[in-house]
Image: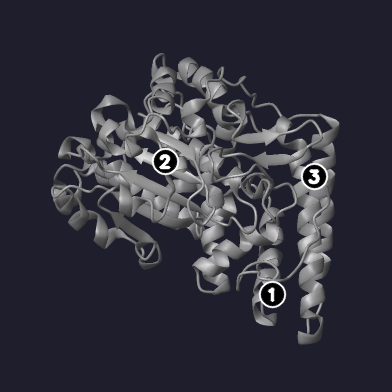
Amino acid sequence: MVFNLTLEDRLPGHAGNLTVEQTASVKRLWVRLFELFAQPGDKINLPPPIDQPKETETKEAKSGGLFGWGGKKKTEEKANNAEKYMFLGRTSDPRWMEMTLMEALPLIPGEKLEYTFWQMVATDNPDSTLLRYLRARKWDDDAAYRMLANTLRWRLHMRVDDISKLGETGLHQELEKAKPGLGDQFLEQMRMGKATLGGPDKSNRGICFINVQLHYKDDQPAEAIQLCSLYLMETARIFMGYPMVNACIVFNLENFTLANWDFEFVKFLLTCLERYYPETLGLCLIHKAPWVFSTVWSVVSPMLDPVVAAKIKFSKNLEEFQQHIDVGSTPVIISKNPNVKTKDEAVVADPPKAGVLEIPNSPEYLAYVEETKLYKKETSEWAKEELTEEKLASDALKRLERGRVHRIARIKAEKDIRANTIYHEKGLIKLTPEARLFIDFGGGNWEMQDITERV
């Protein structure tokens, strides 16, 4: 099936509906990225093995800290905190995140930045990826570039690409190798119902449900909950394809007490949404917040970016909840109706097969690599072209078509790049042998959709 691309009803500031100056901003950002990807970088110094203490003394530590008090102790505490992470940060140079962005960026090999960039684009329209950063920074080219570059170094440090490659089963195996028990803790977070994916909301967005009553900070290491969060965020991005340009998050606060409060996790999640996944939140629905939550809210609300804050809604009961999400998309823990289950709840599936970290060599993957090279070449040439108001519409349509070609090539290679998730096994995400990508949330309010060519 071939879908006809059109410029009708496209959101302003999105691919297919840009002004001449907005298009020029996209071009300038592409040029800067290609220059960044060409840089040689510096020799990579990996962090020491976990069982080998890192030399932590600094001039401040040797002199006893500020005014001679406590410097060494604080430095050792910082080093000990860094050593808690057994998977995150183990394949990147610590300098990449310790230094300021503009100090660290020249040290990172351009080929690594480029690789993680294309993995971040994944099945998205590449222009749309850049546009998220430009919109988030109000079309300030320099600010958008810094934000995007900061995301790339963060992705390398957090091993986001490895998380998607391994999948939950492969990640469990790798974590168990690093520290026995850590993989089991990760899987427990994935399977206990604390956070699940589904959909749609009433704007046809995918949904991440977070059931806060199931979370206790000290029940798992911070690394396990961060890995679970990143894995779900990367999985949720598969649902996206224009016009589904963002997602919905539901915080179910029923039975919430201060024992469920985890400031570090909330700060991590907010940082991810504001800095590293811009323009991906469409709605944040906080359900059944008890009076004790007002204490928490007084801490959280000042931290919120105004753009994120504007997307937060509250519901006191199921009736108000269903103004945003139908009961057919609602987990039983919220609806209290065991006769109406989401597809995630209703379908039992075997765990997905483990993915691998090795670079694939399948024909589909090699074709995708060649397509990426061609996309770069054609985009470099396009960035040099002058654009007039008269050619704006035809240019926009050509770029959409170029994005569609790239998306299709990536989808054909998906099985070699990304491990299947439990949502693949349950049928919410379907990648057919013909390389068509379908989303099937199930329920009476959704029909399975082919999103292969959505750009």
Where in the figure is residue 295, as x and y percent of width and height?
14, 52
Q: Is disc 3 in contact with disc 1, using a CB cutoff of under 8 Å?
A: no
Where in the figure is residue 453, as x and y percent of width and height?
75, 51
Vertical comparison of 174 with 99: above or below: above
Where in the figure is residue 410, as x and y percent of width and height?
75, 43
Circle 1 residue: 23
Type of amino acid under label 1:
Thr
- How are the residues colored? one colour
Type of amino acid under label 2:
Thr
Tell me where residue 54 sits by quadrant: top left
Q: Residue at x 60, y 25 (%)?
A: 425
Q: Earlier in the sequence, mark 1 or mark 2?
A: 1
Q: Nearer the viewer, mark 2 or mark 3?
A: 2
Could you tell me how far apart the alpha carbons at marks 1 and 2 are, in whole angstroms?
40 Å
Query: Can you tell which mark lies on residue 100?
Result: none
Work out which quarter of the rendered image holds the C terminus and state it. Answer: bottom right
Q: Is disc 1 in contact with disc 2, using a CB cutoff of under 8 Å?
A: no
Type of amino acid under label 3:
Ala
Report the number of discs: 3
Circle 2 residue: 330
Query: Can you tell which mark lies on residue 409?
Result: 3
Could you tell me how far apart the alpha carbons at marks 2 and 3 are, in whole angstroms?
34 Å
Categorize mark 2 by other alpha carbons within 10 Å: few (<14), some (14-19), many (20+): many
Where in the figure is residue 223, as x and y percent of width and height?
38, 31
Vertical comparison of 407 with 431: above or below: below
Vertical comparison of 45 with 206: above or below: above
Q: Nearer the viewer, mark 1 or mark 2?
A: 2
Q: Name the element at disc 3.
A: helix
Whether residue 55 is visible here, answered yes or no, is no
